[in-house]
Amino acid sequence: MVPVDAERPIDLRKERKLARESLEAKLSYVLSSTALPMPAHNPDAILDAMPDDGLRLIYEGELAYLRGDFQRTVDCYRKAHGDEALRLRSCQAGIVGAISAGDSRTYTEIETYLKNYARTGHGYVSAFAEMCLATVAVSVIAPSMAPDWLKTGDLNALPPLARPNGLYLRAKYFSCMANFEATLAVAETALSVCSSWPNLAHSDIYLRLMCAIACRYLGRDDEARRWLVEAMGIALPHGFITPFSELVTAFGGMLEECLKQEFPGYYDAVIDQWKRTWKNWIAFHNQFTKDNITLILSLREYHLAGLVAQRVPYAEIAKRYRISVGRLKNIMQEIYSKLQISSRDELARYVFP
């Protein structure tokens, strides 16, 4: 018999539910507090508007990232430890800052942390963690690693204040898939409904760059230059060089031309940062693809890649899989595209690291 005055045992299910709701509520508060647009004439003034040091860290880290001070971005992420909502929010800049800095240890730490919340979190917490991971997936051109909600365009899983960034990632996802008509449509629509102008948000810069890239690949060079120069005019006067150094290669010379013609004082800063960080992103892409190859490729593609890497003749592979040699070659081109490689030798390093 249980005494009538015995203390009721803790209902662990309720405790877990309250904990989840608490973190989700805290994350929503942090997102609302750090989604304020920055004054266009002086973005750093936003720091004085923050009510506490924790929220200020988020802006400090993101401003540092935009200016290419990646170590400071990582430092801000580390200072956010001790508060789960702040730490989760700081991962957004911290994870790409770690890659740009070539800091694989910090990247792995953040990735593991985010994957845990993406797998075990609930509601906005899980979706926000997935969004941070998706930033990496589309940045290293591994769109198959993007979450389903990004592929389908159902952004309702995200906290409302994170949806402008979700739209940017959606545009970048289409760019990875070489669907530049869709890239342009999403980016232009997002700018029309989410723009912070005459104030300034990160998405105002990056969405314009997505429009510029899409127009460039669609052969609409005049429009591409207009979007690119507009983004430069918003960002460069404040020293925000990172959005451009990330995309030097994608523009095929146009970015350098625009810098020389319109903003020559920033040419060296952008190009020098590109030279410093590009090798870090390439090294990371290669390792990321090797580590996740069985997720990037379907099981059938992985088996075909293994045979091709072993230099089994195409005719024999095609016969084994009952497909034509032409179809096999098309599949292999898709595999090469997914892995961002171009030869059997490179393929062998991925399949047999």
Image (cartoon, rainbow, N blue to C red):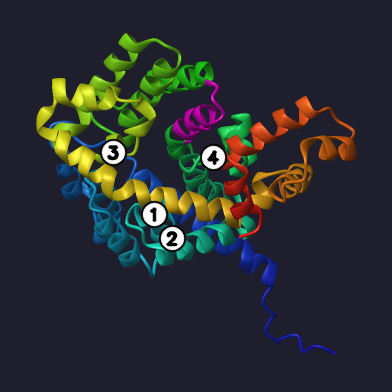
State if disc 2 and disc 1 touch (CB < 8 Å): yes
Seen in the picture, residue 97 relative to 135 is either above or below; the reply is below
Verify CB contact (< 8 Å) between mark 2 and mark 4: no
Residue 325: name its quadrant: top right
Give whichever of discs 3 and 2 has the lower sequence position.
Answer: 2
Give, as a three-letter code, the residue at label 3. Answer: Ser
Q: Earlier in the sequence, mark 1 or mark 2?
A: 1
Residue 119 falls left or right of residue 308 = left
Residue 242 in the image: x percent, y percent?
27, 41
Q: Quadrant of the C terminus?
A: bottom right
Q: Looking at the image, which residue is at 30% across and 36% down?
A: 243
Res. 241 image quadrant? top left
Q: Which residues are magenta?
A: 166-179
Residue 229 sits above or below residue 92 on the image: above
Query: Mark 1 — residue?
Result: 99
Of mark 2 and mark 4, the one earlier in the sequence is: 2
Q: Position of residue 18 (x, y in %)?
A: 58, 62
* Mark 4: secondary structure: loop
Specify which label sits upstream in the sequence, 4 or 1: 1
Residue 107's disc number: 2
Q: Residues within 10 Å of mark 1 (few under 14, many from 20)?
A: many
Q: Is residue 303 above or below residue 87?
A: above
- Badge nearest the viewer, 3 or 4: 4
User: Circle 4 is placed at which residue position?
Assistant: 340
Residue at 37% of width from left, 62% of height from top?
Answer: 103
Q: Position of residue 203 (x, y in %)?
A: 35, 32
Residue that badge 3 annotates: 245
> Residue at image x 51%, y 48%?
128
- Mark 1 falls on what kind of element? helix
